[in-house]
Amino acid sequence: MNPGTLRQILLITDGCSNHGEDPSAMAAFAREQGITVNVIGVMEQDVIDQKGMQEIESIAQTGGGVSQIVYSSQLSQTVQMVTRKAMTQTIQGVVNKELQQILGRSQTIDDLPPEKRGEVVEVVEELGETAGLEVLVLVDTSASMTHKLPTVKEALLDLSLSLNARMGENKFSVFVFPGKKSDVEKLLDWTPNLEALTKVFSKLSPGGMTPTGPALREALSYFKKKRSLRSLLSNDDEQFFEESV
Amino acid sequence: MMMNNSLRSQCKALPGTIIKGKWYKNEYKVIKELGFGANGIVYLAEFGGQEVALKVSDNSMSISSEMNILKSFTKVQGSALGPSLLSVDDWVNQGVTLPFYVMEYIKGETYLDFLRYKGTSWSVVLILQLLKNLSLLHQSGWIFGDLKPENLIISSPSCQIRCVDVGGTTIKGRSIKEFTEFFDRGYWGLGSRKAEPSYDLFAVAMIFLNSYYPNRFTKKTDGYSQLSQAIKGKKELKVYEQVLEKALLGKYSTAMEMRNELLAAANQNADRISRQQPSPSRNMRQTQSRSRRKQKKGGLLESLLLVVLISFIYLLYIYTKLL
């Protein structure tokens, strides 16, 4: 059994979308294509916006992922925890499907006696450690996010540190929304570590609307583009790949 | 990380609640809550007249994973590694199935509380004990991961340090899954999050620092120089500067290596202290020096005798020559 490469979109935002299609619909659309959507809501110390929270929860739910609301000081730990939790969740889903085929339709990991469960968990952990992982990070850079961006950068560097300790291969890319000319703008192409982020992040000029839905849609199409190009080009020809996008 | 509220209310069990296992039908009577973390609540409970610790969670993955780790610990001889695992089961509470496991209850204080009551002079002793435990853990292929004072209990009355909460324990060579920033070398920019002995040893050094900086501190710009300033800032830590620096920089590949050097530094320090303050052991030292003086006197007598003997023989020689 091999879950292959796990694909995730990690959305970092601080509230409500106000432009374009419903982000939850886009998240559900992503899920249909085997891409999990996780959402982290970054809050001010005392401002908790009920509507924003609902949207955050709903995007993650329809996207088959994990959501978490945090204060910006806790962002680093949360980002890596959410990513890992979602990975385990996806793998668990795959394992559950296999179990159902073997044991009958209503059986899941939780229905096994504790000892057997332990053996399954061992397999899930092993897969989580060795599977390939692609994370497309989507950062909200609307005006209200301005002073949270340095923390977001730190958290992403920390994420790459955590995941690169795994045995499996990692690929990250970073997008921001709204972009200068369009709804979403590519900041960093697929790369195994996020070191290069330090330079590009300082050049960001936050402001504008919050087109969460359109941003998700564009991010999805980027996953697809990548895959179709991959089938044409050899894997290690990264340079050419980058130019052709 | 805060635990979400639904888990907190689902796993809530008031004192007196009977937790009955779905599979093995054992009944555990809750005495009180011992603590809660990101993925569960730990209770003190009574079973068959014995006190046990019982961890309930809504996350069967993490419970099963911890169960696996504790199980593999029981296979290691002389396990001071973690609490020993007694049973695993599910608790059906108001229609919700909650996995739990039962382990040995380790009675005692957590590391920082213990130092607060007994004094920080205990810190080096406890760190030496901890390093011995870690050495055993590492040899059996595990890295503790989330090593911090809250996860260390000094059992009474033997004052032995024990590691509890194995949620972060990871197979060597994999990636650390749970950590706490202050004790994580990745946070300080001093290494990767790969599970290897030096990862734990970094945390050991930070626990030592935490003993003298109970409030901890957050990272400014350069992690390394900040930590090394912190070591220099306390004379109790400065004595172990070399060992601590090496641990922070990941220069120890085994816990025993660090333990040996820490022990040597501790001995040196003890010698220095007793030289500086002769008062408490004056009596012993006086008798020591007296016997040494006696020895010296005896030596003098011996050489005098030798000189007399040689001069006598010489005189005898001259005398015979003269004749």
Image (cartoon, coloured by chain):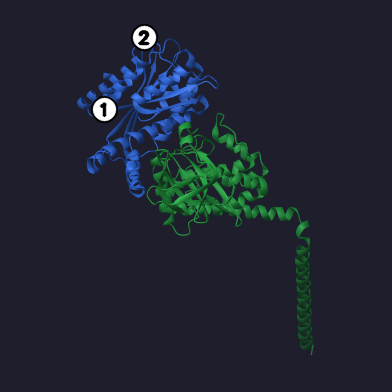
Chain colours: A blue, B green
Percent of width and height locating residue A223: 29, 23
In the rendered structure, the answer to whether residue A174 lies left or right of residue B225 reads: left
In the rendered structure, the answer to whether residue A107 lies left or right of residue A201 reads: left
Answer above or below: position of B22 versus B308.
above
Q: Secondary structure at mark 1?
A: loop
The local crowd at label 2, few if under 14, some if 14 to 19, many if 20 or more residues have their Cα within 10 Å, is: few
Cα distance between the residues tagged 1 and 2: 29 Å
Q: How many marks?
A: 2
**Residue furthest toward the bottom?**
B323
> Amino acid type of disc 2?
Lys
Please state the chain letter of the residue tagged with numbered disc 2 in the rendered image.
A
Q: Can see residue A32?
A: yes
Percent of width and height locating residue A89: 35, 34
> Amino acid type of disc 1?
Asp
Percent of width and height locating residue B206: 56, 41
Rendering quarter of residue A235: top left
Residue nearest the observer in this picture, A35 or B202 = A35
Percent of width and height locating residue B236: 66, 45
Residue that numbered label 1 is attached to = A237
